[in-house]
Amino acid sequence: LADSGYLRKCMDEIYDGATACNLLMDLFLNEESENGSAFSEDERHELLWVLLRLLTTGGPLSQPEENVQPYYNVLRSFLRALLHVVRDPDAGGVRSISRAVRVNSLDGSHVGLFPVDNSNNICLLVFTPAHRTVSFLSSGFVPFFS
C-alpha cells in the first residue's frame, strides 16, 4: 500500500477461484503471501480483517479498486451498521458492545451453508445483547471458472 492509498499491483494469481491482482488481495487470498507474517492468527480472525477481506476479494467477476479509500469507506459503513459502541470513560474512547460470530455449519454438522464449498464464503452473525438485536451478513462465493 503506497502512502497515497494506491494498491500496489502484482501478477494475477487465482486462489480458490478468486483473482489476486494487487498485494492487498494477495495478502487475504494467498496463505503463503510475503506480507502474511505481518499479522498474527488472532488478528486474522478479527471482524475488521474478515470484513476487509470480503470487500477486497469481491465476487468472481469483481473489478477491484486501485485505491484503498473506497474499501475503507464501505468498511466504515459496514461497521456502523453491524456494531453498537458505547463510550468507555476508563479507556477514554469507545468500545463495542456487539459480538460477532462466524457460522460455518448448522448443528455442528459438516453440511455446508453455501452451494459451493469455498474459502471465500462467509456467514456472520453480530449479536448486541443490550439492544436485543442480531445482524446477519452472508456472502456465497461461486467461482466463475471452476
Image (cartoon, helix red, strand yellow):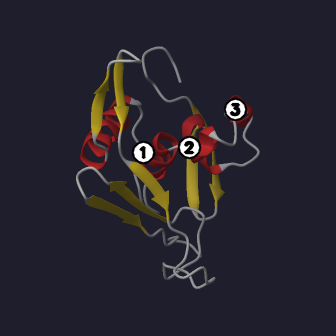
Can residue 11 be seen here? The reply is no
The crowding category of the residue bearing disc 3, from other C-alpha atoms within 10 Å (few below 14, some 14 to 19, many at least 20), is some
The amino acid beneath tag 3 is Asn
Per the image, label 3 sits on a secondary structure element best described as loop
In the rendered structure, find residue 35 and report the number of the disc placed on it: 3
Residue 55 appears left or right of 15: left
Residue 5 appears left or right of 104: left
Determine which residue is flagged by label 2.
Answer: 25
The amino acid beneath tag 2 is Met
The crowding category of the residue bearing disc 2, from other C-alpha atoms within 10 Å (few below 14, some 14 to 19, many at least 20), is many
Q: Residue at coordinates 60% horizontally, 64% vertically from top-left?
A: 119
| Residue sitting nearer the eye, 80 or 84 | 84
Q: Residue at coordinates 36% horizontally, 47% vertically from top-left?
A: 98
Check whether the beta carbons of the residues at disc 2 and disc 1 lie within 8 A of each other.
yes
Determine which residue is flagged by label 1.
Answer: 64
The amino acid beneath tag 1 is Pro
